[in-house]
Every structure is written in C-alpha cells, then in structure tokens.
Image (spheres, grey):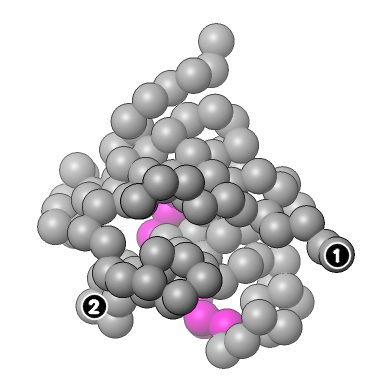
C-alpha cells in the first residue's frame, strides 16, 4: 500500500509528511485553494485536478476538507504543519488579508 502524504490530526490540523507530493487544500467553493509545498503555503490559482489520478500526475494530492475521508465539514480555521517544522494558521474569515496565512509555531532551530 502506498504511503499517504498527509495526516489528519485532531479537529482541524493537517500534517504534510511526504516531500514527493504537494498538497492542494480545498475548503469550500468560495474560499481560496491552498498549495502546501514542503517549505511554504501559497494561494493556488492553477487548474484544479478533477480526480486523484489527475492530481497524482501533477505531483500533488487533492484534499477536500469537507469530504468524509477528511474532516467531513467546512472548517473556518485550519492548522497545517509543513515538512520544515513550521505550523501555519489558516483563518478563512481573513481571506484576502495578510492575516489569512500566518506562522503559528516555528520549530526550526
């Protein structure tokens, strides 16, 4: 069985764990789509893959927050831990501002 490139932890935390794949996080139709790379989080404005196979061909994994395999519901706030040991806070109520994506914890030395 292939290793899953992320973990779901608690009520609203995603942990990126495989450098090979970027994570494409979708949290509703109106909210910005996020691209989680090993070292950063950015707003994604490219084409969104229709299915898992298409996403894999783009070297990414599509994560729909509201799907039953993830959180099963919309989340107004997420925490995402990247491979460089930084945890980011994503506050969807502040989308479009500098406070939308902020560093919550920095465990790098």
Q: What residue is shown at x 27% (from left), y 62% (from top)?
A: 75
Q: Which of 34 and 77 lies nearest the eye of the viewer?
A: 77
Q: How many marks?
A: 2
Q: Position of residue 91 (x, y in %)?
A: 22, 50
Gap between marks 2 and 1 measured at Cα = 34 Å
Q: Quadrant of the N terminus?
A: bottom right
Q: Position of residue 72 (x, y in %)?
A: 38, 72
Mark number displayed over residue 31: none
Q: Is residue 55 above or below residue 38?
A: below
Q: Is residue 40 above or below residue 60?
A: above
Q: Which portion, as a residue range, is magenta?
A: 40-49
Q: Which residue is mark 2?
A: 30
Residue 29, by quadrant, is bottom left
Q: Position of residue 92 (x, y in %)?
A: 21, 58
Horizontal relation, residue 38 to residue 80: left or right: right
Q: Quadrant of the C terminus?
A: top right
Residue 26 visible in the displayed image = no
Mark 2 vs mark 1: in front: 1
Q: What residue is shown at x 38% (from left), y 39% (from top)?
A: 88
Q: What residue is shown at x 40% (from left), y 46% (from top)?
A: 10
Residue 5 visible in the displayed image = yes
Q: Which residue is mark 1?
A: 1
Q: Which of 59 and 81 lies nearest the eye of the viewer?
A: 81
Q: Residues within 10 Å of mark 2 (few under 14, many from 20)?
A: few
N-terminal-most mark, 2 or 1: 1
Q: Is residue 42 magenta?
A: yes
Q: Which of 41 and 74 lies nearest the eye of the viewer?
A: 74
SS for dot 1? loop
Q: Is residue 26 above or below residue 52?
A: above
Horizontal relation, residue 69 to residue 100: left or right: right
Q: Is residue 102 magenta?
A: no
């Amino acid at each position: 069985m292939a290793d899953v490139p992320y973990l779901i932890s608690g009520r609203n935390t995603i942990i990126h764990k495989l450098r090979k794949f970027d994570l494409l996080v979708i949290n509703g139709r109106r909210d910005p789509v996020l691209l989680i790379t090993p070292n950063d989080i950015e707003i994604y404005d490219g084409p969104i893959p229709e299915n898992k196979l298409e996403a894999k061909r783009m070297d990414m994994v599509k994560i729909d927050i509201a799907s039953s395999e993830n959180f099963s519901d919309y989340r107004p706030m997420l925490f995402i831990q990247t491979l460089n040991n930084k945890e980011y806070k994503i506050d969807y109520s502040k989308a479009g501002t500098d406070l939308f994506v902020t560093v919550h914890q920095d465990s790098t030395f």
